[in-house]
Image (cartoon, rainbow, N blue to C red):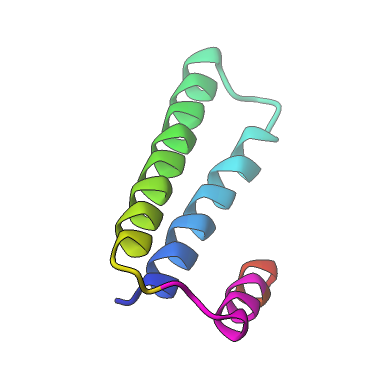
Amino acid sequence: MDYLEVILCLEKNKMNLVKMLEAQNLSNEQLESIQHSIDNYNYIIELTEMNYFERGSLPNKKTEHVLKKRLIQ
């Protein structure tokens, strides 16, 4: 998997969790667990970005556009 695929997968999973938070029938324990998972995804995304950018392979404008377009879908 390349950087874009990993980031897209992580962001998609995180967004699914964010949508789960909107359910009104969740217990406090479930809410905390989901929030903890979202925090973990944010951390993993941050580490992934740090690893990618440390290698000096900055995405070009076309790549950034493709990433944003895929995230919207």
- Would you identify the image quadrant in which residue 58 lies? bottom left
Quarter placement of the C terminus:
bottom right
Would you say residue 5 sits in the magenta stretch? no
Instruction: Answer left or right for 36 relative to 15.
Output: left
Quarter placement of the N terminus:
bottom left
Residue 7 percent across, percent down from the top left: 44, 63
Q: Residue at x 39, y 39 (%)?
A: 43
Which residue lies most toward the top here?
28
Residue 55 percent across, percent down from the top left: 28, 67
In depth, the one of 51 and 5 nearer the eye is: 51
Instruction: Answer left or right for 57 relative to 72.
Output: left
Would you say residue 63 sits in the magenta stretch? yes
Image position of 32 with respect to 14: above or below: above
Which residue lies most toward the bottom here?
62
Q: How many marks?
A: 0
In depth, the one of 60 and 64 nearer the eye is: 60
Q: Residue at x 46, y 33 (%)?
A: 39
- Would you identify the image quadrant in which residue 54 lies? bottom left
Read off the magenta span.
58-68
Residue 44 percent across, percent down from the top left: 36, 46
Image position of 55 with respect to 40: above or below: below
In depth, the one of 22 and 6 nearer the eye is: 6
Mostly what secondary structure, the magenta segment?
helix
Residue 42 percent across, percent down from the top left: 46, 41
Q: Residue at x 70, y 35 (%)?
A: 22
Q: Residue at x 63, y 33 (%)?
A: 21
